Amino acid sequence: MADILQEVEHRPWALPREPWIMAQSWHDLLFAHWRVEAALLRPHIPLSLEIDTFQGQAWLGIVPFRMSGVRLRWTPALPWLSAFPELNVRTYVTAQKKPGVWFFSLDAANAIAVRAARWWFHLPYFKASMKCEEQNGSIHYLSERTHHGAPPGVLEGRYRPERGFFEAQSGSLEHFLTERYCLYSAASRERVYRGEIHHPPWRLQVAEAEFMRNSMAEAAALVIPDQKPLLHFAHRQDMVAWAPRVI
């Protein structure tokens, strides 16, 4: 991970001065985005966060992938703990001139990781039964939420890259949707946190996808518009994260 900390020219602000606390790698990731009205998202996001828009349009994302090498700084990755699928439902917000990600939900197939992330990062993680497998060039993905007391959520589909790699240009929609270097979370409507992250620029590919079942937005009391999503695939991304701080 030391290598990625040398690649900083693309960042919109400087790296934090404190040491990072967590590292992980993301694999076979699909960005599926739908245009939505910001007013529909506003009731679900703390008022201290501004909904970030691109040319006046807010976006709702559903992002399935799998993780590996999940570990704390100075600790090794453990096979039974450090690799598992994850799925998030997200939009984009900004505070204090730092645009980032707001998660409506994050489902993961590791109960220990779910408990730790809920406690430490104040993120809405949920336990789920999940599969992420490559078959004939496509990623077959299935996630069924099993978290006690949580709204049911299911994603079943398959996706694959279609074209060659590219890096999103600054000012483009693809850059707006993917090049984010912090996340926001909340312990309450008034107590909001920012967690800084770092990764190299995304190497994206245009993607195609088919969803047989998708109730992830409804599980977050949101509605996916009746439109085709904007789809991008990333084979791998390495990242590090810092401890969240109250803003």
Image (tube, grey):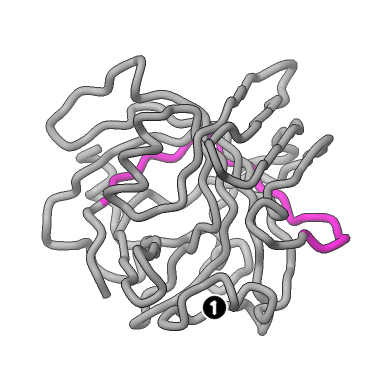
- Decide if residue 23 is on the left or right side of residue 219: left
Residue nearest the observer in this picture, 120 or 64: 120
Residue at the spot 51% in from the left edge and 46% down from the top edge: 106
Q: In the rendered image, which quarter contains the C terminus?
A: bottom left
Residue 227 lies within the magenta run: yes
- The quadrant in which residue 187 appears is bottom left
In the image, the segment drawn in magenta is 224-241
Residue nearest the observer in this picture, 18 or 173: 18
**Which residue, as the protein is rendered here, is positioned at the far front?**
149
Instruction: Give the overall secondary structure of the magenta segment.
Output: strand
Q: In this view, does 4 lie above or below 133?
A: below
- Decide if residue 202 is on the left or right side of residue 43: left
- Which amino acid, mark 1? Ile
Q: In this view, does 98 lie above or below 84?
A: below
Q: Is residue 116 above or below residue 41?
A: above
Q: Mark 1 points at which residue?
A: 51
Residue 30 lies within the magenta run: no
**Which residue, as the protein is rendered here, is positioned at the far right?**
226
Residue at the spot 35% in from the left edge and 55% down from the top edge: 122
